[in-house]
Each structure stands twice: as structure tokens, then as C-alpha cells.
Amino acid sequence: MASPSATAPPPTEWRRYGRPRRDRWRTLVSGLGQTLVTAGLVLLLFVVYELYVTDLFAAREQDRLADELRTGWNADAPVVGVPTSPAEPGVGEPFAVLHVPRLGEDWSRVVLEGTTEDQLSQGPGHYVGTAMPGQQGNLAIAGHRVGRGSPFLDLDALRPGDPIVVEVADGWFTYRVLGDEATGDFADPSGIPGQQIVTPADVDVIAPTPGGPADAAPTGAYLTLTTCHPRYSARQRLIVHAVLDGPGVARADSPDGPPALTED
């Protein structure tokens, strides 16, 4: 006959709480692991969407906007002499093309009026109320650093003296990044730095004279480009300031654009 200790069932507490408790922990850990894997996959898909899929959408929009813009420009008669500043467009309308040779030989982006996400998801946007191309004041343009076409991804690559060409219906206006071209120092005798890092609250960078009062008369014709900084963050803003270099070149006089477009 077997001894009672060999045949007796486990204590009631052991049966009720011992093994089920281990099973519950095993289930909890397994579920947590699956949740983390799922969250990681969702995050990865989100990053892929933000970095690549939105770029494809933005590229398609840029092609459409460029066709729309040039169709309208081709309908206008050519102008000989100095190009004119375009009339202020309606919000969401394309009105100019930005060329930055430093960012690539064929780098260009259509600029829309407005800086809400509706506009910035399609390309760089012009701050409403700031100067138009060629005008006295500050032509201020914002663009995404990463995603939505990443137009200003490498904005920090610009150096003093670099040309930024703004193409309009009847010609081109060339701006030059402020600073000392010989040394590469962004400090400029005008007091306006060619490049700076600011907080989102520092809106005076788009004032008529960059860094000056919003209600003061401009002291020249400037161009300001703004984007998020650092990459993948909106904590700060990377700012590039440039000044108009001459009166501009008419399309009829130079169909292929100003010499600045082909500078080394």
C-alpha cells in the first residue's frame, strides 16, 4: 500500500495559487512582449511614412505646382529689363520657385503663399505679410526640415556669399547669404547674421529688417529661410538670412537664369 504522503493530493493552497500564479506572470510577460513588438512595428511604420511616403506625396505635389505655375507664366508676354515683384497671391497659391545651388545643381522648390501645414506639406511657404521677391523688406519663407519633401533638410550647409535665387514670372532675383565669404563667419557688418539658431518665440527674425521691430521701416531687401532645428525636432529654429544682390534679371534678357545659378 502506498504511503499517504505519496498518494495525497497537493495542498489546496498550492493547487489554487501556486501554479496559476506562475502562469499569470508568464502570460503577462508574453503579452507585454507582444505589445512592445507591435508598438515598435507601428513606430517603424510611422517613421517610414514620415520620412519616405510623405516625401513621395510632396514630390508629386511639387511637379503639379510647377506645371501649374509655368503654364501661367508662359501665357504672359516676356518683359525686357528688370523683373517685377509679383502681386501678393492668395493663400495656398504658388507664385515663385526657389533655387539654392549649394543644395544641388538642380535643387528647386515651388513656393506657396502661407505657412500652415496645408501649404508646408506641399513645399516651402511664404509668411503672409512679409515682402515679396525683389521688394524692400524681408521675404520670409518656411520649410520642413524632415518629411513632407524635406526641402530644408540641409539648410545648415549654406555658407556666407552663397546665392539663393528666387524665380518669378518674368525673371529672377538673386540673394546672397550674409556673412564673411572669405572666412566663413556668419557675422555680418549689417548686424544681421547669415545663420542663427533661435527659439520658436523669436519671431523678430522675419521682421522687415531681420531682428528689428515688426513695425519699423525696412533697411534693405532681405530673404529669410526658416526651418526646425535640430533634425527630427521642433525645439528650435534654424534661420538663414540673405540680402538682395542687384536689381534682378529679366527672363527675356536671360532665359536660362542669372549666372548665380551655375556658380561652383
Image (cartoon, grey):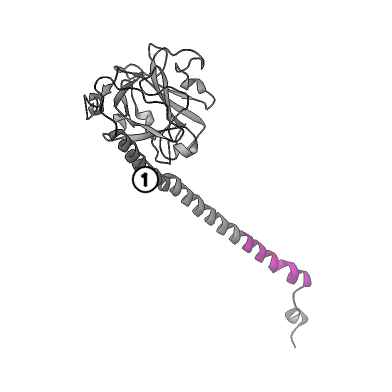
Q: Nearer the viewer, residue 105 or 29?
A: 105
Residue 167 in which image quadrant: top left
Residue 175 is inside the magenta segment? no
Residue 13 is inside the magenta segment? yes
Q: Nearer the viewer, residue 227 or 30?
A: 227
Residue 203 visible, this angle: yes
Residue 264 visible, this angle: no
Q: Quadrant of the C terminus?
A: top left
Number of numbered discs present? 1
Circle 1 SS class: helix
Q: Amino acid at mark 1?
A: Arg
Residue 153 in which image quadrant: top left
Measured as percent of width and height from the top left, residue 36 is found at 55, 54
Magenta residues, start to end: 8-28
Above/below status of 140 relative to 61:
above
Measured as percent of width and height from the top left, residue 210 is found at 45, 18
Residue sitting at x 77%, y 69% = 13
Q: Quadrant of the N terminus?
A: bottom right
Above/below status of 73 relative to 220:
below
The residue to which callout 1 is attached is 60
Measured as percent of width and height from the top left, residue 137 is found at 42, 18
The majority secondary structure of the magenta stretch comes to helix
Residue 81 in which image quadrant: top left
